[in-house]
Image (cartoon, helix red, strand yellow):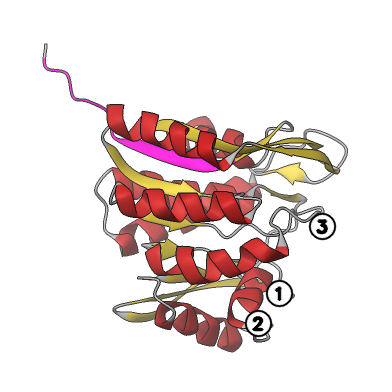
Amino acid sequence: MNYKEPDVALTVAGSDSGGGAGIQADLKTMEAFGVFGTSAITSLTAQNSTGVRGVEDVSSEFVAEQIDAVVEDFDVGAVKTGMLSNTETARVVAEKIDEHDLRAVIDPVMIAQSGDRLLSEDAEEVVRDELVPRATLLTPNAPEAATLTNAEVDSPEEMERAARSLVEQGAEAALVTGGHIEGDRVVDVLADEDGIHRFEKARVETGATHGTGCALSSAVAAELAKGASLGDAVGTAEAFLYRAVRYGIDAGEGANSVHHLVELRN
């Protein structure tokens, strides 16, 4: 019997005890895309669909040990980063991306959907200066893009400027997502070596907003791990996220979760 080793992706992120975002969402998404998901946990959060009750950070040294353990044993095709929490962890993750020459999808998680801060203000500078230049793809939402570029991002035109600015800061490509911007349609903007690309879709009237950024970045990382081009990976992830939001899961009393297995459940 011929056996093909699975494509492997790595998520470096925080744990969401509510299951809708973070490590849990990343691994569900990677599995749904047919990729073997591995992980390095940066923080433990006590949270549910209504908010974050507490955070316990893992030491940066142990985050590094987790990454090394995975990469030394598995052929990791791509890594995605999520909640990094503090300066030391953000810096060590940047160093490990370099050391292991990893294709990296950087989701610069700063604020939870509930409004709770998930990245210290000091660490924002490390993300801007050390992680952005190492990104194969950067996936900020509009508020995160505004923070990283020190400019307003309240329209598709401003999203384009922000995406270009992030590429000028060193990212190979930047996908600025527009779910936070009001309007009947949601526009995401990708800037890469080929120029500007818009992904536009009707806004879905749903409460399934928890974990959207995690699902999108994990889907891109999974597709990259399978060998897809960046443009194709983003296009596939965008189509997946639209359906995952449209057919979201109503579990809990707060924000509904995106449906990470939507393509399998039909």
Q: Are marks 1 and 2 in contact (CB under 8 Å)?
A: yes
Asked whether residue 236 appears in the rendered view, the answer is: no
In this picture, is 241 found above or below 193? above
Kindly identify the residue that appears in the image at 59 percent across and 87 percent down.
158
Question: Which SS class for mark 2?
Answer: loop
Residue type at mark 1 is Ile
Q: Secondary structure at mark 1?
A: loop
Residue furthest toward the top?
1
First of labels 3, 2 by sequence position:
3
Q: Is residue 138 magenta?
A: no
In three-dimensional space, the C-alpha distance between marks 3 and 2, rounded to whole angstroms, equals 18 Å
Determine whether 124 is above or below 221 in the image: below
Above or below, comparing residue 7 to residue 215 in the picture: above
The residue that label 2 is drawn on is 153
Residue beneath the point at 31% across and 44% down: 225
Where is residue 194 shown, x and y percent of the image? 29, 79
* Residue at position x 74%, y 33% in the image: 18
Locate residue 23 relative to residue 238 in the image: left or right.
Answer: right
Residue 196 placement (x, y as % from top left)? 40, 81
- Residue at (55, 54) in percent of width and height: 90
3D distance between C-alphas at marks 1 and 3 = 16 Å
Residue range highlighted in magenta: 2-13
Q: Which residue is mark 3?
A: 115
Give the residue number, with chain letter if any, for mark 1: 181
**Residue 19 pos. (x, y %):** 68, 33
